[in-house]
Image (cartoon, rainbow, N blue to C red):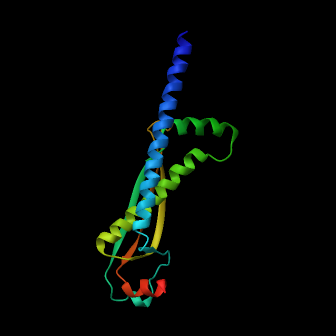
């Protein structure tokens, strides 16, 4: 009887984690989509050097960083799925959100600077685990680049 109660409590915890995790994920995606639309005018390039038209314009290093972890339900599903191998789709959405969020944070910093284009954009990722290495998994995404104020470049690219 005690085993059934423990199993029931565990199932309830997983169901609650699934519901709240899914709601949080949906809310975050809505926020990401609206911010992406608002910041779409800030262009990002991975070229190391900006075109000559940026010469003499002000520039600054901008970055965006986020550390994100999966909810308990997705961790349990990923652990079960890893037994058989294959894609861990429960983590893919978390990594997508983290990548997009870091880009948005970099764009927001560029906007505060008054920039409209970012060159030499680079990504760094790191995985973090609890002290024992068996608990929750987290991923950090860092994106950085050089932000420029270049009204002429945006006009040329938009045309």
**Can residue 135 be seen?**
no
| In the rendered image, the vertical position of residue 105 relative to residue 53, given as above or below | above
In terms of depth relative to the viewer, which is nearer, 32 or 52?
A: 32
The percent coordinates of residue 34 (x first, y second) are: 42, 60
In terms of depth relative to the viewer, which is nearer, 131 or 157?
A: 157
The percent coordinates of residue 65 (x first, y second) are: 40, 58
Q: Residue at x 61, y 45 (%)?
A: 88
| In the rendered image, the vertical position of residue 82 relative to residue 139, given as above or below | above
Q: Is residue 127 left or right of residue 88?
A: left
Q: Residue at x 51, y 31 (%)?
A: 15
The percent coordinates of residue 106 (x first, y second) are: 39, 65
**Can residue 92 be seen?**
yes
Q: Is residue 89 left or right of residue 138?
A: right
Q: Residue at x 39, y 88 (%)?
A: 152
- Number of callouts: 0
Quadrant location, the N terminus: top right
The percent coordinates of residue 26 (x first, y second) are: 47, 48
Q: Residue at x 48, y 58 (%)?
A: 99
In terms of depth relative to the viewer, which is nearer, 11 or 48?
A: 11
| In the rendered image, the vertical position of residue 62 relative to residue 72, given as above or below | below
The picture quadrant where one finds residue 32 is bottom left
């Amino acid at each position: 009887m005690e085993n059934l109660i423990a199993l029931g409590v565990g199932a309830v915890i997983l169901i609650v984690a699934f519901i709240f995790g899914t709601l949080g994920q949906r809310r975050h995606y809505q926020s990401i989509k609206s911010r992406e639309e608002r910041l779409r005018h800030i262009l990002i390039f991975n070229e190391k050097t900006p075109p000559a038209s940026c010469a003499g314009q002000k520039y600054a290093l901008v970055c965006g960083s986020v550390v994100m972890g999966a909810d308990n339900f997705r961790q349990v599903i990923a652990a079960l799925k890893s037994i058989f191998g294959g894609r861990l789709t429960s983590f893919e959405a978390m990594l997508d959100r983290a990548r997009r969020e870091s880009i948005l944070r970099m764009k927001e910093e560029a906007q505060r600077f008054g920039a409209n284009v970012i060159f030499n954009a680079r990504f760094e990722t790191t995985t973090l685990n609890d002290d024992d290495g068996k608990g929750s998994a987290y991923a950090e995404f860092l994106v950085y680049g050089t932000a420029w104020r270049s009204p002429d470049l945006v006009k040329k690219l938009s045309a």
